[in-house]
Amino acid sequence: MTDTERAGVGLDPAAAFDPAAAFDLAAAQKGLDEQPFSRLLRARLTAFGDGGATLELDIREELLQQYGFVHGGVLSYAADNTLTFAAATALGPAIVTGGFSIQYLRPARGRTLRARAEVVHAGRRQAVCRCDLTVLAADGTERLCAVAQGTALSLNSPADNGPAGGG
C-alpha cells in the first residue's frame, strides 16, 4: 500500500461511500495513525471535514536537512497526506493520490509545520485540491513556505469495478 492510500486503510474500495456514515476527524486520525511513516513523523490531523483538512507536525532535528530547514520530503509528505484527506471529505475514504505538485517558496523554519488543504473541485471520480504549508514560530506567527496542488481518485468509481471493456 502506498502512503497516498491512507484514508482508505482497512476499507473495501468496492463499497459505495455513504456520506451519512461516521467519517469524521476521529476516523480520519485513526487512518493516519495506521500509517507507520505518519507515526514516525508524529503527524496529527487537527481539522477534517467540510471540504478541507489540516495536518500538523512538530519540527524536530530529525526532520531537518543540512542547512537547518525542514527537509523537502517532509513538506511533500505533509502536502500529499493533507491533499488526500481533504479529497476524502468529498469522495469518501477509499481514494488514492493521482498526482501532485509542490512549489517551495522559502525555507521552512519554526516549531510546527501546518498543512491546510481544501477541495477546489470534486466530481464523482476525482477531486482537485490545493494545500498551503506554513510554519509556526515560537511566538505564534505563521509564515507560508510552500504551496501544492493535487488530484485524488476514487477507488469506488464504476470504471474500477470489473475488467476493462465490461467483459
Image (cartoon, rainbow, N blue to C red):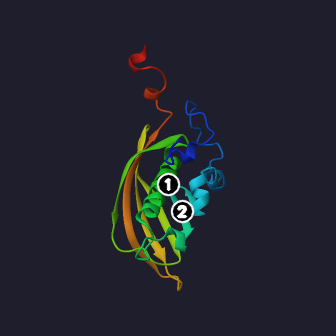
> From the viewer's perspective, is 13 left or right of 119?
right
Residue 89 in view (yes/no): yes
Task: Find disc 1 in the rendering and name its residue.
Answer: 81
Q: Three-letter amino acid code at disc 1?
A: Asn
Q: What element carries label 2?
A: strand
How many other residues sit within 10 Å of disc 2, few (<14), some (14-19) or many (≥20)?
A: many
> From the viewer's perspective, is 24 left or right of 76?
right
Q: Farthest residue in the bottom direction? A: 139
The picture places residue 51, in percent across and down from the top left corner, at 49, 54
Q: Are marks 1 and 2 in contact (CB under 8 Å)?
A: yes
Q: Which mark is residue 61?
A: none
Q: Residue 55 carries which label?
A: 2
Q: Is residue 159 above or below residue 166?
A: below
> From the viewer's perspective, is 20 left or right of 154?
right
The picture places residue 109, in percent across and down from the top left corner, at 45, 77
Q: Which is nearer the N-term, disc 1 or disc 2?
A: 2
> Which residue is nearer to you in this view: 151 or 108?
108
